[in-house]
Image (spheres, rainbow, N blue to C red):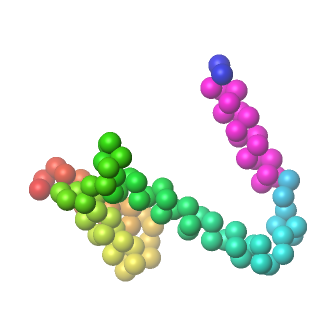
Amino acid sequence: MLIIYCGIITYLTRFSMIAILKKEMFNNRVRDVLSYVPSAIFPAIIFPAIFLDDLGQLQLENNPKILAAGIAMIIGILSRSIIATIFSGLASYWFLIFVV
């Protein structure tokens, strides 16, 4: 029950900031800076998933995730499609771990 209460409180605190703050309240400079937040946070989420093993140590050798991420990056640059990037990354990763 405690987990449900914590989830509700977390949701309400995040939703309140979205509901209360209006885009008109910010000047152009603040909006420009905030537009970079998702792209700044994304590498912090992706890096550990690709480069760290289960123990939190850097794994560069025999790591199929690095090659799959590179393939997905190339497909993403060429196709400009999020769906194609996701599917190519997953397919190449699964191919590398199950077939190769």
Q: Is residue 74 found inside the magenta-colored segment of the image? A: no
Q: Is residue 89 among the parts visible in the rendering? A: yes
Image-based side of 96 in relation to 81, left or right: left
Locate residue 81 relative to residue 92 in the image: left or right.
Answer: right
Task: Please provide percent x and percent y for residue 45.
Answer: 48, 56
Q: In the figure, 25 relative to 95: above or below?
A: below
Percent coordinates x, y for residue 8 in the rendering: 71, 33
Which residue lies most toward the front here? 57
* Residue 43 sits above or below residue 79 on the image: above
Task: Based on the picture, tell me whether residue 8 belongs to the magenta stretch.
Answer: yes
The x and y percentages for residue 12 are 76, 40
Which residue lies at the image location 55% right of the left edge and 61% below the top edge?
Answer: 41
Q: Quadrant of the C terminus?
A: bottom left
* Of the pair 30 and 83, the residue shown nearer to us: 30
Q: Which residues are magenta?
A: 3-19
At 62% from the left edge and 26% from the top edge, which residue is drawn? Answer: 3
Q: Residue furthest right?
A: 25
